[in-house]
Amino acid sequence: MYYRPPLDDIRFVLRAFDYEGTVSSMPGFEDFDLDTAMDLLEGYSRFCVDVLQPLNAKGDAEGVRFVPETHEVFLPDGFKEAWAGYCENGFTSLPFDPEYGGLGAPFTLSTLASEILIATNKSLSMCAGLTTGLLDALEAHASEPLKQRFMEKLVSGEWAGTMCLTEPHCGTDLGLLTTRAEPYGDHYKLTGTKTWITFGEHDLTDNIVHLVLARLPGAPSGTRGISTFVVPKYLEDGTRNPVFCGGTDHKMGIHASPTCVMNFEGAEGWLVGEENRGMVSMFTMMNAARLNVGIEGVALAEAAYQAALEFARDRRQGRSLDPAKQDPDHPADIILVHPDVRRMLLEIKATNEALRGLVGWMSMHYDIMHRHPDEATRAKAGDLVALLTPIIKSYGSERGFYNISQAMQVMGGAGYTRDWPVEQYMRDERIAMIYEGTNHVQALDLVGRKLPMGGGRLMRGFAAEITEVIRRNADSELLAPFIAALKTESKRLNETTMAMSAEAMKDHELIGAVASNYLNQFALVTLAYVWVRELEAVVDLPEDDRLRRGKLQTARYFFDLVLPEAAMYAEKVAAGKAAMTEFDAELF
Amino acid sequence: MYYRPPLDDIRFVLRAFDYEGTVSSMPGFEDFDLDTAMDLLEGYSRFCVDVLQPLNAKGDAEGVRFVPETHEVFLPDGFKEAWAGYCENGFTSLPFDPEYGGLGAPFTLSTLASEILIATNKSLSMCAGLTTGLLDALEAHASEPLKQRFMEKLVSGEWAGTMCLTEPHCGTDLGLLTTRAEPYGDHYKLTGTKTWITFGEHDLTDNIVHLVLARLPGAPSGTRGISTFVVPKYLEDGTRNPVFCGGTDHKMGIHASPTCVMNFEGAEGWLVGEENRGMVSMFTMMNAARLNVGIEGVALAEAAYQAALEFARDRRQGRSLDPAKQDPDHPADIILVHPDVRRMLLEIKATNEALRGLVGWMSMHYDIMHRHPDEATRAKAGDLVALLTPIIKSYGSERGFYNISQAMQVMGGAGYTRDWPVEQYMRDERIAMIYEGTNHVQALDLVGRKLPMGGGRLMRGFAAEITEVIRRNADSELLAPFIAALKTESKRLNETTMAMSAEAMKDHELIGAVASNYLNQFALVTLAYVWVRELEAVVDLPEDDRLRRGKLQTARYFFDLVLPEAAMYAEKVAAGKAAMTEFDAELF
């Protein structure tokens, strides 16, 4: 209806962060130069817009249907056919090894593609996302026979995947999980209940393959006693494996994405990776999954922005306060002339384009860390991915939700109705701050794990990137105000980091109290860095070039009106923990 | 289920802002001393919790039913009986003149009561709120015969009211409206279409009375040609007046509050107030209505907070990072021990209690401005109400929505499901940032109308209140850090105001660009003032007094972790308009 995939900006991001120099020049990716990549994304976009988008509101209105008697779950009419079309086009196979039927495209492309998939149908994107997550884990950790058995049909999309982690009493704290796996011949039988299982049961595919965290007999308690198993709904001989859906959750949004309680009643499963090392395969899935959650914010904020912009160009209310901007042919001006409407639109545009740039840049590093021939280069890329993934997941989802709310505000009452898609986007997006590790879990990951790693190596690596971009543009008059602000804020971030780290060594509780605010400060500096990288890529274009003007003017809003938030978060971090930890529990 | 009306805090607010000294000591209110007032609120609360709350989720799930053939709208089962009970208890009549069957209670009480009504059933509260708005307008502007004809049945709740302002092509910009009123004997016939009419049609009452903005023949264009009419669904002889519901909107929330398109097809109406002075009666309704919208944020954030707190006291995940706080009897601690969970809860508590205080304080001023025997005192109170009403409406709704989102975040996935009420609160609350004048309209009202009024008289009046509270507590060691911060931030606000006002005189567009950020800076300073007032009221209590500890510890969070946002908004205001107004329209 309103959404046009932002292919121009995606192409720009690929150029600005030197996709051809860093990704498609690597062995195995030679067939995916920039033009080929964009052709691929264009075809993908057409399918998403033509086939998936028309189902989006319908999926929301109808939701999934659970049949308790048979444990079946049905998606709304049309979803099964849409998924079949998605698979026939080979879209599930993009990033996977051609050995298993994959297209072998860079992760960068499938990641950027997922923005379009999510924007057109977030519910259905969950099926693709979970299957990809499972495949990542199998590719990295499964034995060759297991790969042979499962991967091809998952790559083709004939089968779908899930991740079964959470149990009723444990979500964030997986160490508490109790699902058990008992030896049964050369494999295992699993018993236990899993909750919040996305696409745990559905009618899109012939088979569903669950990746399940469980405990072997005698395993240590806590997270060091968790192993990973692969558990198919149907066994090789076609027998139904006893893993049943016990119900679906009724949620605020993503209504066409079934969220299932899954009961494993002695279901047969096969060990993936080593015993008691299940958290490793979980984290393999997590980096990509968390990047993807950040993209959800970008995708739905982009779609909401487009709806709000269309509305703002059409709706006439009030007069411009600048007489020169008044339209004499109408009794009122389009609301796009009003500075506050522009403010709200730019709140979205100035952060969302930077987030897309960050996602693109990180997804390239994801390819580099897996495929680059040089080990040091791989390690360096891995460091950046590890450091910035929690930022993308947490800030991307928080800002995405805020941005969609801004888009609704532009539209007034219309945005609050189902006549426009924005209210659905808002409901669909809200879960992103919660799942795949809540945003605070991301902040703890950043402050408690990523910062101390290697004595601060990750942060030093990122700081070097910032220093380098500042040095490189030191003589640019045009970029001077942006460079100056980046310098100020990265220095402030460095000070915040040092002060916080010094205190945190003596006081672990402090980390919990300040991590969420610290992550936001970090995110804003990261986006400022991304903006400077994007501006670098346009400064040499002719002055009247549309792209150059758009990027410069949008960046100006970011540096004038968004970046001031960084200092505020720094102050909140500096406030420490006392107001929280010394608050008496009974006074809440 | 989870909600307990915050009667203790309401009683505290009444005491802290000297309800007995300022309100119940005024002529006519002698019967409503603090204890009587609290008894009244307790009875009210019981009814809301017992009768209205159980219908809240049901109303959300079922929504209203529109029958196109008959133009009828039906609320979910149970609502009609609940409304009848509400009326039988006399709750609709609280603040109105006993001459028309009202109880004659202070506005303060009905305002504080509405928090509880909204928290238990926001949809139904809309019917009460609109009827009150209509009554306010009739009381202030209608002729005696019209009052006699309409008020008693509206006060008793046998009839309900609406406000018909918006038309398809005009919401914010009422000057564009085209509904016309043509003379018909001693009254008029109205023709036109009104949209977004809350409770425009329903089955709760025998009659529905619409207050309608329309143009008389030959009226000037713009807002100076608008008159107000009262248009009942049924005429005195029982004939159906041709005003029909043409449809209801499908909204993100408040599903049991019908939002109607109303077609006036030559419907008979009577002029309220003077010709072409319709905006005056509209603004009469607006102050109270806008205060009420701010309360919606307080109400639903309180209810969400209670749900989140109950969850946080029960749910066990992870270990406290402070070993001394670990619970040896369980493998995990309640999540309330985690600093970030406390942070999220305190984000709500520290702002919501202050907003409740502000609402209480302003509602007392509302009573004073209407009832105080001394004209100067009335005028001073009126100034404060005029200045702070846009703050309450805008910041109350924005912060309310944010706070509910924080409550959901505490609860993780559970909060995202319909098993808990929080996701409904979030959907129900989001409209508050839009209706009764969007939040930006509030900001324009503050900056463009209220600040310049009387050469800055309103702002000087509020500044004097701040100066006085600082002076009064200059020697308090306990309050020193709070006083110091209030001093700093009120000085900063003053500087922002002066710099902005100087520029705005030369440049009207600037107001539009900075007003929303300015309002938020202003709101934070206002809440800091309210906190100091509340702390003043507890400092002399014994050190271990629960109320004293609670207020001091909660205020500490506000001053340490929320107030730093004020400086950030000041920076955004200082950034001016260029990034918005110089952005080329085609680059969006």
Image: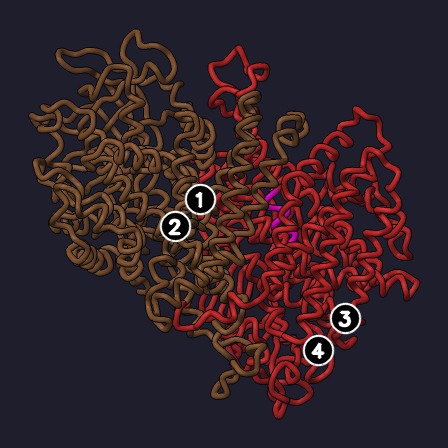
Chain colours: A red, B brown
Disc 4 chain ID: A
Disc 2 chain ID: B
User: At label 4, which amino acid type do we have?
Assistant: Val
Q: Residues within 10 Å of mark 2 (few under 14, many from 20)?
A: many
Q: Is residue A344 visible?
A: yes
Q: Residue A389: within the magenta?
A: no
Q: Residue at left 46%, top 65%?
A: B414
Name the residue beneath numbered marker 1.
Answer: B395
Name the residue beneath numbered marker 4.
Answer: A272
Per the rendered image, the range of residues in magenta is A294-301
Nearer to us in this view, B183 or B276: B276
Disc 3 chain ID: A
Quadrant of res A290: bottom right
| Nearest-to-viewer mark from 4 and 3 | 3
User: At label 1, which amino acid type do we have?
Assistant: Tyr
Secondary element at tag 1: helix
Disc 1 chain ID: B
| Nearest-to-viewer mark from 2 and 3 | 2
User: At label 2, which amino acid type do we have?
Assistant: Leu
Name the residue beneath numbered marker 2.
Answer: B355
Q: Residues within 10 Å of mark 1 (few under 14, many from 20)?
A: many
Q: Is residue A153 visible?
A: no
Secondary element at tag 3: helix
Secondary element at tag 2: helix
Name the residue beneath numbered marker 3.
Answer: A453
Percent of width and height locating residue A167: 52, 75
Q: Residue A300: within the magenta?
A: yes
| Nearest-to-viewer mark from 3 and 1 | 1
